[in-house]
Amino acid sequence: MNEIAEPFTETSIESVLLDAELFVKYSSPEKALELLRSSLERSPRSISLREKMRDICVKQKNLNEAARQCLALVSLYIAREDFDVAYDRLQEAKLLDPRISVAPGLEAIRRARRPEFAAGRDKSPQNVRTDVTFAGNLAFVSIFDAVQVIENSKMTGLLVIKSDIYLANVAFNDGKIVDAECNGQNGATAFRDIIEINGGTFEFSVSETSFPVLITVSSNTNFMLDVLTELDHERAEKQGLRNVADEQL
């Protein structure tokens, strides 16, 4: 009967990380990856081992494995309540492999946020990462304006929106909106919620790979105006129904 190997201690993990770095330094990245894989079998919840695996895979252009490690890290960071890092790894996974849907991860982060975590945060502008193409605070720059910048620059990448209520992203190919995800929904349905977000922060990161097309638009501006018009009509209809109901009381 095979014995189950005990998880590594922190000292053992540090030794593995050092050996992996030495393998990479002396041009043996495959040996480093092999060592990390076997180590993760014993300590699958080690963030440092997975981060090292992710880093080496990115440098070796093994993007599928790097994306897989990013997704695994999302769960680990959520468990530690490191939500900002979880966001970053989820965004990176999408950039590494555009086929990945980040909706489940966004939903997991949303559910993991405790009410007191959101309520206890001060109302000052959130910290924004600087290792992205551009970023901003939605209290000063609207989503409409951010989308126009991306369209004018014809950039391919992912716009991530973060707030205490909404967790969302919009994918672009050559500046055109091609997909959106918000609180577990995809496509145009998700974008309906995104366009009304007016608080929180946004970050845009470029991608070398195009994203799958779930939304087809000829103009981002026309698409957004159509969505806003549709929402206005729906609100007007609901208000009309309320007025009729009030008159009948």
Image (spheres, helix red, strand yellow):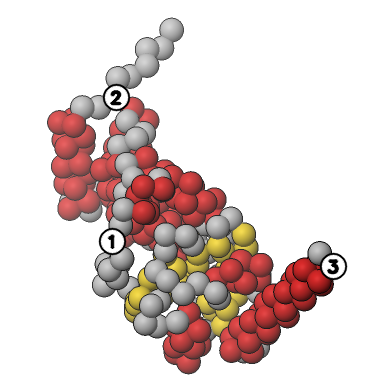
> Quick check: 215 left or right of 44?
right
The mark closer to the camera, 1 or 3, is 3
Q: In this view, does 166 lie above or below 136?
A: above
Residue that numbered label 2 is attached to: 7
Q: What residue type is labelled 1?
A: Asp
The mark closer to the camera, 3 or 2, is 3
Residue that numbered label 3 is attached to: 248
Residue at image point 42% right, 59% down: 164
Residue that numbered label 1 is attached to: 122
Query: Could you tell me which quadrant the N terminus lies in?
Result: top left
Q: Where is residue 218 in the image (x, y as percent from the top left)?
A: 65, 88
Residue at image point 46% right, 74% down: 198
Q: What residue type is labelled 2?
A: Pro
- Quarter of image, res 87: bottom left
Tell which of 193 and 128 is nearer to you. Answer: 193
Could you tell me how far apart the alpha carbons at marks 3 and 2 are, in whole angstroms?
69 Å
Q: Is residue 45 visible?
A: yes
- Quarter of image, res 126: bottom left
Q: Can residue 170 be seen in this view?
A: no
Q: Where is residue 242 in the image (x, y as percent from the top left)?
A: 75, 69
Q: Give the mark nearer the N terminus: 1 vs 2.
A: 2
